[in-house]
Every structure is written in structure tokens, then in C-alpha cells.
Image: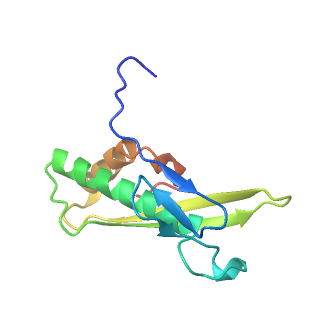
């Protein structure tokens, strides 16, 4: 850990075989399961949905921070994340993630600056390909 780095928060998730849930930071478990498209029941959240939710919430919180810091009204802002699971063969899987950002109160260069700042703030935004414009 770098000397200037300060831990702010730690979350924990635990998945146990056969339970059909993942316990998150001591709270009630979230139901999980494979999507029906992949032969599962389709009940519960799958890893792709949870990852998309993490990306959308992280980037949106960062967008609100960046907008507020630059004097842009974050009202009506929205982030939609999409995660695609791909199979590269030999049980090698990967996620491809994209995001759309709506920031109605800013246009052009001002909007771009807020989004660029949000991408720097959100620690998992480097997984987006391409980054939202």
C-alpha cells in the first residue's frame, strides 16, 4: 500500500456451493443462479448482472461526484452498463463491458470533462471498452 493511500471501506461477498445465494457484507443473501440462456434456471442474479450493477452504480456515483465538483447539476443523470460474457474456447471466458451515460444538464466539452473525471474516480471503470463518451 502506498504511504498516501487510505482504506475507506471494505465489502465482502461469500458464495457457498449449493446455497443459491451470495451473502454480501453480513446482509441477507442475494439469490444467484445461471441464466436460462446458459442452461440455468434463470432464477436469481447471475455474475454478469451483478458485474453490470457494480459498474453502473460505481460509475454513476463517480459521475455525481464529478458533476458536483465542476458545478454541473447531476439531476436526471443515468448510467446504463452492459456486460457480455464471451467464450474464447477451452473454458476461457471473458466479460466485455460498455456503459452509456446520460447527463442532461451538460453538453459538449463540459459533459466530456465530467465523464472523464468520473472515469478517473470510479476504480472499476478501466474495465469499460470503449469508455463512455
Seen from this angle, which residue lies furthest right? 90
Number of marks drawn: 0
Which residue does the image show at 53% across and 50% down from the upper left?
127
Which residue does the image show at 37% across and 59% down from the upper left?
57
Left or right, 51 with reference to 8? right
Which residue does the image show at 17% across and 65% down from the upper left?
75
The answer to whether residue 56 of the structure is visible from this angle is yes
- Quarter of the image for residue 53 reads bottom left
Specify the color scheme. rainbow
Residue 86 location (% of width, % of height)? 70, 65
Residue 64 location (% of width, % of height)? 24, 54
* 121 or 44, nearer to the observer: 44
Residue 133 location (% of width, % of height)? 40, 58
Left or right, 89 with reference to 77? right
* 124 or 104, nearer to the observer: 124
Left or right, 105 with reference to 113? left
The answer to whether residue 129 of the structure is visible from this angle is no
Which residue does the image show at 54% across and 67% down from the upper left?
21
Q: Is residue 77 above or below residue 61?
A: below
Q: Is residue 22 above or below residue 42?
A: above
Seen from this angle, which residue lies furthest top? 3
Left or right, 34 with reference to 131? right
* 76 or 124, nearer to the observer: 124
Amino acid at each position: 500500500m502506498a504511504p498516501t493511500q487510505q482504506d475507506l471501506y471494505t465489502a465482502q461477498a461469500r458464495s457457498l456451493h449449493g446455497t443459491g445465494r451470495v451473502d454480501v457484507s453480513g446482509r441477507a443473501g442475494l439469490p444467484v443462479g445461471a441464466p436460462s440462456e446458459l442452461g440455468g434456471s434463470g432464477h436469481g442474479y447471475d455474475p454478469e448482472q451483478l458485474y453490470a450493477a457494480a459498474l453502473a452504480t460505481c460509475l454513476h456515483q463517480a459521475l455525481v461526484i464529478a458533476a458536483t465538483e465542476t458545478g454541473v447539476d447531476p439531476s436526471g443523470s443515468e448510467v446504463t452498463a452492459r456486460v457480455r460474457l464471451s467464450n474464447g474456447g477451452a473454458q476461457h471466458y471473458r466479460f466485455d463491458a460498455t456503459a452509456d451515460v446520460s447527463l442532461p444538464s451538460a453538453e459538449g466539452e463540459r459533459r466530456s470533462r465530467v465523464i472523464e473525471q468520473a472515469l478517473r474516480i470510479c476504480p472499476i471503470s478501466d474495465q469499460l471498452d470503449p469508455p463512455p463518451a
